[in-house]
Amino acid sequence: SAKTMEIMGLRIPAYFTDDPRLLYDYIVNFKTKSDDVFVVSYPKAGTTWIQEIVWQIYHNGEVNSKRIEDRVPFLEEAINPKASQPDIASLPSPRLIKTHLSYEAIPKGVNEETTCKYIYIARNPKDNAVSNYKFLTSLAKSTGLNASWEFSADLFVQGKSTWSHWDKHVLGWWKHKDDANVLFLKYEDLKKDLLSHVRMISQFLNKPLSDELLNRISEQCTFNGMMKNAKSYLLRGTEDGPKLLRKGVVGDWKNYFTPEQSERFDKELLAKLDGTGLEFEM
Ligand code: PPS
């Protein structure tokens, strides 16, 4: 599998920095501002989707062809010399930032000037694992790394995928779902009713929009809507390489899981949600 380094209990791809201590220092010393908005998720749960919605909410529904990572840069790649994304510290406010950090690890404010907002998106672990597998294998051409679905699913259950344990990540944020500065969303809910979630996000951000604009943004941010601007979701430095948009459906896992794998995910991951009130449609 891909080389990772451990930072704050999370497995982060090693190519993000030559020196894990530098990235650790960058994250723990990161100074938040009250109007910062962090788009947070376990990888492949719908980060790009929320990044685009949030960006359009702040830009009057504009569809912009610049790559999403240039518009909403990725915190963990902030000091990656190979990443060409803009410097987060000098972004104009409000800064929109993508991250996969756990609740424990994410930069937090200490007072009114520094307490910022977090939008977390979670996805059922079976689709999440398939999306992760498809993404990693799409990177194989450039990284030379490849893995079977069996191997990949096994790593996912063991919490050895990138950014570590799915269940700890999701539950760590779920515990804070009622905090005033946290909005906890589920991929499957957005698929069912995007418009009401775009409205919910705009209200959470104190950016109430007209019905006309809310409608426009939710149409532009459906999977097909975003595919019209597909270039924006190519990974850095690739023209026809890995994409951040693939299939965009609920239930694709049924095309990959054996009954045994499905049962294992139920017993070893979904069972951890029992009694927490967190449930997923699949
Ligand atoms: S990453 O690399 O962690 O930032 O990836 P992330 O954006 O979190 O997850 C990618 C998956 O989200 C799907 N996606 C969408 N689904 C529905 N509607 C919209 N608009 C949308 N945008 C992105 C994307 O297709 C990936 O899921 P899969 O299942 O692989 O298609």
Image (tube, rainbow, N blue to C red):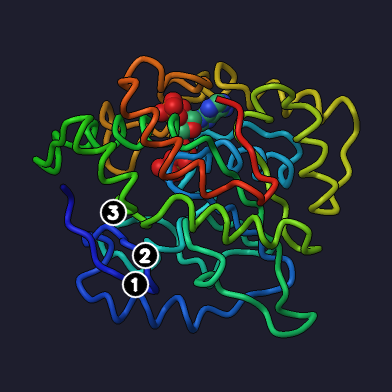
Picture layout, residue 215 above or below residue 157:
above
Quadrant for the C terminus, please.
top right
- How far apart are the alpha carbons under marks 3 and 1? 13 Å
At mark 1, the secondary structure is strand
Residue 50 sits in which quadrant?
A: top right
In depth, the one of 165 and 119 nearer the eye is 165
Q: Name the residue under label 2.
A: 10
Residue 51 sits in which quadrant?
A: top right
Numbered circle sitting on residue 160: 3
Numbered circle sitting on residue 7: 1
Q: Whole-percent x and y of residue 280?
A: 60, 34
Please indicate, yes or no, whether residue 232 appears anywhere in the rendered image. no
Ligand 1 under 8 Å from disc 1 Cβ = no
Q: Whole-percent x and y of residue 66?
A: 48, 39
Residue found at x 26% / y 30%: 241
Q: Whole-percent x and y of residue 31?
A: 58, 80
Residue farthest along the left direction in this orientation:
144
Ligand 1 under 8 Å from disc 2 Cβ = no
- Crowd rating for badge 1 (residues with CA inside 10 Å; few <14, some 14–19, many 20+): some
Residue found at x 40% / y 55%: 165
Amino acid at pointer 1: Ile
Residue found at x 55% / y 52%: 170
Q: Is residue 159 left or right of residue 175?
A: left
- Crowd rating for badge 2 (residues with CA inside 10 Å; few <14, some 14–19, many 20+): many
Residues at circles 2 and 1 in contact by the CB criterion of under 8 Å: yes
Please indicate, yes or no, whether residue 110 appears anywhere in the rendered image. yes
